[in-house]
């Protein structure tokens, strides 16, 4: 009896104490556990069949007869609405093929052009607008961003990705996801992982070592999860080290859900070759194989049976459904409605943003004797050649966007110039006979598409055309609309070159604004441009496109500029290169030891001054070099950048913070990031080759 009374007393005391010390964090926990209880109760009230409808995408049209790119039907009996998916990442309203043709939308410059802006806050705005337009089209999930690394210059989807560099790619992944999700649309980071080639993409087996995977191919996904809390991940088609990504337990349960703590859901790409039992047990949550031509829907046909046979536990399916519902709840699709901005398409500020991104994303590669900007007041005639009559809005495949309007180079330039005669020459046979010999602009277009890689990086016949024009004209300007690096045997014969990628619906307006100096170029290359194909990695067939459906990533961590620097290959245009109509001076590099402050080790600061005659923006880049290391490390690794707008004569102080992870490599022995003590070099460049400031510091563990 005595014991019982004492027990009751202690329990009451504990309860009383607890009720007096309720902290705000506890409230958060309570909310979370209430939500968890609510989702759990939804899951437990579902039949097995209903649970399976929540993890298998079907083919469906909306009320306007437009096909959803992806569709989970929901369960009306339980008040669960459908989950409707839309392609990204160049804009909402992407098309794939006619049966999935969606309404038009704002066509932004493609992601590689977006990252050429090196302007993360601009990409955040792009994410927001694409989210708002996705909402306007009655969709809940935007299938983007694509954050695979540009490994080879031929990659069919290089234009859909951000960079050859994992740090740069991570920054834009985070900004874009934050923008999309801010307006209540779920983002989906894809294709997890290493979908770096499109030839044989459904079956290719990529042999990638563990360190390379962690240092190069995974960081953008990790950042989207840890820093932007992305709602979903799309598994890639390919195999990594013998296992399809959609049934790869090391990637899904191991790295994404385990190591990184991902709480959202993982879906397949459309029609992956996963098998029911291995995929469900590996951590795949949804299959999107609802399209007949993409093979048999495994979960739909086999999951119930696998559960009955005990090959997959029903608790595994419960968790799959739980993850989908939790995200639906977070985005206000279930009981609790949340306030997000209304959806709207083609608004004025969307058009303005598309223009701004195009302007900031077009890279001035060459500008001999300040050929550009052209002075419109002194210009009587201007001759346009090549592909000038059509805007090259985007690449092709699932990310293609049909814009409400687009501005071709010809229209953009003609509208801009009031007193100059603009002549477009269709007949390039007779260049030698044209009378006008002043200024020629040659427009080059090379398409690139999902589904296959480009066969070559040569412009072939068009290189000859450029040379013939350059012989005839006083000044020849070349504008390249390509997805990346092409060989330029004519480079010394022309006066100026602009890399415009696929610049979206505002192409012509943006090009005119840059050509005539209304805007000052500020873009820089997010990928290295090589002189020849052999300058790049993966020159053997076993390395690309692979032999017997197997491809060796034998270059390891040496991708992009890491490769060029290691092998002392001089690039045609370096990673981070891009000219301006003004000049910038860098000075006062100061490194301050702030290692007592949590994870941050060094604060880096320096000043940039606009020393030229025009206002403009400069992208400065911070590279790190580990002077002595127990493993082979790249000569430079990008660990920071900044874009700063400066008026003529103006100076601004730039700051970066370097943390322990920035100093680290992936240590395969301890299976963790490792920062070794010793000397590191901080390198500040205007490009990866044009180094302006450098200073060393000694890292000591505390
Ligand atoms: C692509 C994905 C796309 C999906 C839906 C796939 O072929 O790889 O990026 O989101 O189709 O269209």
Image (cartoon, rainbow, N blue to C red):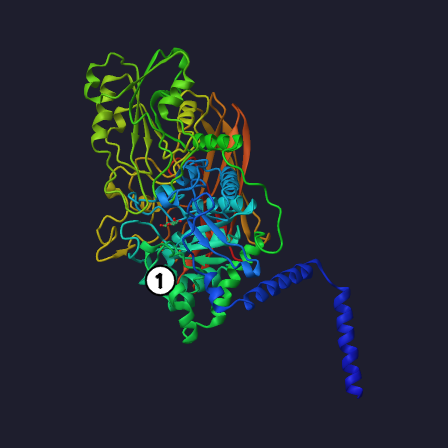
Please tell me which residue lies in front, 549 or 618. 549
**Quadrant that contains the C terminus:** bottom right
The residue at which mark 1 appears reads as 274
Please tell me which residue lies in front, 39 or 458. 39
Pinpoint residue 4: horizontal percent, then vertical percent: 77, 85
The answer, for residue 696, to whether it is visible in the render is no
- Among the 4 quarters of the image, the one containing residue 301: bottom left
Query: Mark 1 vs ligand 1: CB under 8 Å?
Result: no
Pinpoint residue 51: horizontal percent, then vertical percent: 49, 65
The answer, for residue 314, to whether it is visible in the render is yes
Total numbered circles? 1
Q: Is residue 74 above or below residue 591?
A: below
Q: Is residue 516 above or below residue 295?
A: above
Pinpoint residue 358: horizontal percent, then vertical percent: 43, 32
Pinpoint residue 266: horizontal percent, then vertical percent: 45, 58
**Quadrant that contains the N terminus:** bottom right
- Among the 4 quarters of the image, the one containing residue 215: bottom left
Q: Left of 287 or right of it: where is 446?
A: left
Q: Is residue 504 above or below residue 640?
A: above
Q: Left of 482 or right of it: where is 455?
A: left
Please tell me which residue lies in front, 217 or 113. 113
Q: Left of 468 or right of it: where is 370?
A: right
Decide: few, some or many residues near mark 1? Use Cα within 10 Å; few <14, some 14-19, many ≥20.
many
SS category of the residue bearing label 1: loop
Q: Left of 180 or right of it: where is 482?
A: left
């Amino acid at each position: 009896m005595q014991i019982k009374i004492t027990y009751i007393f202690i329990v009451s005391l504990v309860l009383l104490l607890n009720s007096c010390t309720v902290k705000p964090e506890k409230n958060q926990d309570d909310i979370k556990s209430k939500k968890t209880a609510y989702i759990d109760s939804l899951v437990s009230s579902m039949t097995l069949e209903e649970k399976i409808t929540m993890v298998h995408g079907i083919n469906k049209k909306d009320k306007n007869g437009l096909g959803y790119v992806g569709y989970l039907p929901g369960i009306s009996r339980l008040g669960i609405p459908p989950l409707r998916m839309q392609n990204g990442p160049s804009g909402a309203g992407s098309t794939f093929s006619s049966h999935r043709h969606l309404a038009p939308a704002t066509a932004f410059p493609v992601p590689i052009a977006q990252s050429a802006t090196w302007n993360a806050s601009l990409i955040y705005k792009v994410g927001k607008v694409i989210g708002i337009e996705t909402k306007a089209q009655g969709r809940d999930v935007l299938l983007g961003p694509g954050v695979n690394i540009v490994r080879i210059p031929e990659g069919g989807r290089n234009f859909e990705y951000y960079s050859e560099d994992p740090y740069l790619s991570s920054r834009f992944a985070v900004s874009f996801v934050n923008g999309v999700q801010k307006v209540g649309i779920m983002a989906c980071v894809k294709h997890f992982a290493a979908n770096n080639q499109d030839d044989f993409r459904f079956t290719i087996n990529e042999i990638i070592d563990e360190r390379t995977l962690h240092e190069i191919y995974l960081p953008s996904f990790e950042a989207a999860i840890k820093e932007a809390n992305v709602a979903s991940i799309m598994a890639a088609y390919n195999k990594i080290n013998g296992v399809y990504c959609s049934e790869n337990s090391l990637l899904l349960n191991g790295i994404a859900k385990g190591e990184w703590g991902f709480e959202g859901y993982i879906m397949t790409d459309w029609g992956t070759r996963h098998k029911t039992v291995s995929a469900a047990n590996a951590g795949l949550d949804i299959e999107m194989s609802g399209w007949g031509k993409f093979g048999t829907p495994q979960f739909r046909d086999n999951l119930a049976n696998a559960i009955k046979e005990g090959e997959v536990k029903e608790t595994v399916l419960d968790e799959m459904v739980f993850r989908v519902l939790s995200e639906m709840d977070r985005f206000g699709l279930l009981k609790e409605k949340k306030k997000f901005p209304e959806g709207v398409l083609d608004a004025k500020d969307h058009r303005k943003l598309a223009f701004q991104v195009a302007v900031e994303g077009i890279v001035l590669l060459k500008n001999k004797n300040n050929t550009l900007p052209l002075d419109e007041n002194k210009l009587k005639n201007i001759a346009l050649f090549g592909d000038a009559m059509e805007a090259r809005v985007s690449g092709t495949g699932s990310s293609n966007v049909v814009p409400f309007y687009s501005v071709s180079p010809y229209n953009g330039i003609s509208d801009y110039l009031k007193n100059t005669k603009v002549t477009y020459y269709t007949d390039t046979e007779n260049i030698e006979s044209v009378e006008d010999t002043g200024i020629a602009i040659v427009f080059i277009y090379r398409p690139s598409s999902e589904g296959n890689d480009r066969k070559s990086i040569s412009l072939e016949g068009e290189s000859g055309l450029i040379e013939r024009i350059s012989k005839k004209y006083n000044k020849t300007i070349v504008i390249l609309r390509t997805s990346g690096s092409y060989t330029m045997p004519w480079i010394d014969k022309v006066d100026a070159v602009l890399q415009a990628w696929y610049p979206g619906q505002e192409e012509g307006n943006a090009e005119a604004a840059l050509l005539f100096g209304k805007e000052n170029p500020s873009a820089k290359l997010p990928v290295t441009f090589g002189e020849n194909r052999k300058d790049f990695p993966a020159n053997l067939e076993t390395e690309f496109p692979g032999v017997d459906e197997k491809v060796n990533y034998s270059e390891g961590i040496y991708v992009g500029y890491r490769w060029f620097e290691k092998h002392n290959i001089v690039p045609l245009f370096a990673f981070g290169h891009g000219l301006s109509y003004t000049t910038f001076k860098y000075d006062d590099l100061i490194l301050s030891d702030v290692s007592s402050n949590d994870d941050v080790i060094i604060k880096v600061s320096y000043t940039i001054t606009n020393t030229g005659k025009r206002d403009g923006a400069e992208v400065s880049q911070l590279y790190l070099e580990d002077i002595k290391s127990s493993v082979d490390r790249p000569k430079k690794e990008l660990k920071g950048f900044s874009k700063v707008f400066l008026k003529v004569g103006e100076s601004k102080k730039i700051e970066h913070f370097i943390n322990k992870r920035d100093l680290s490599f992936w240590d395969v022995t301890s299976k963790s990031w490792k920062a070794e003590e010793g000397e590191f070099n901080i390198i500040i460049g205007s490009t990866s080759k044009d180094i302006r400031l450098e200073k060393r510091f000694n890292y000591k563990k505390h």
